[in-house]
Image: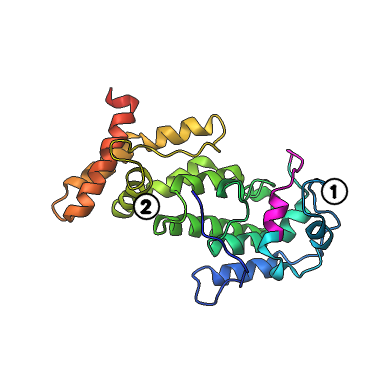
Amino acid sequence: MTRKPLEPPTGIQPDHPLFDLIEDAYRVFACRKPKSIEVCRGCCMDAGIEADFFNPPIRELPLRYVQDWYSAAYDPKGIAKETWAYLLPRILEILACGGNVSNVGIEVSLNRFDTGNRENWSMEEWRILDSFQREYLNRTVNRQEDFLDEVICMFRLGGWDLEDLFAQVAAISGAKLAQRLWHDWCSWPAPGREGISITPFWKSPDNVAAFEFYTSRMLYEKMAALALADDTDAELAAKASAVAGIVEANAAWSH
């Protein structure tokens, strides 16, 4: 799903819900500028951007620089921790502000290092990353910039535990989850083509696990209960019923 552009970057504003966390990220991850950009040189990036990449202060690193860096090939094993830690605060800030760090898709935003592995970070660094993941996923439920599945995939590709990610989704209130899934599955396809939206960026076997979650009896019962509850308003009940119907139509347990 295409996200709105963020150029020129103005930085996160004090009234933003993640402002304090981003400020903490800049403080905790502050380090010397790396010696290498850790991507293909003299080929993939714009020559001017490549030469100037580490000159701006990290807070002022232009969005187009970040996007050009993401367009460049890198070692499939990942990049050096020092380079990734240096760039992380700016990457998190752009994501928090609703911008694209990569024009390929939000799913690849955090996958150049095993970001979601707490063993790679100090206690304070992990506090920030874990809090960002949870706050960002929770905020996604109330926004329509990205599909929920895309954001879950982004964190999974970044190294976060898949079961924990789905546990966080399962803990979301039925009303909010129904609204979110109805938007993702029902609001945009042509009538009659509604269905579970799963990003192609999932890797095997996580793609199977994602589909199993979206077709789980737990999710069906949560949506069905909301649809049938006496205190659910008609519009929300209709959306929950539609989501429940899609879950049931695709679930192995229903056939």
Q: Is residue 202 left or right of residue 170?
A: right
Closer to us: 185 or 253: 185
Q: Position of residue 174 (x, y in %)?
A: 30, 50
Q: Which residue is mark 1?
A: 42
Asked if residue 246 shows in the view, the reply is yes
**Alpha carbon distance from label 1 to label 2:** 47 Å
Residue at 74% over, 60% down: 86
- Is residue 178 shown in magenta? no
Q: Are marks 1 and 2 in contact (CB under 8 Å)?
A: no
Q: Based on the displayed image, in which of its 4 quarters is residue 132 positioned?
A: bottom right
- Is residue 68 shown in magenta? yes
Rendered view: 121 above or below 32 = above
Q: Which residue is mark 2?
A: 172
Asked if residue 226 shows in the view, the reply is no
* Amino acid tagged 1: Gly
Highlighted range, magenta: 65-77
Rendered view: 230 above or below 128 = above
Q: Position of residue 28 (x, y in %)?
A: 69, 66
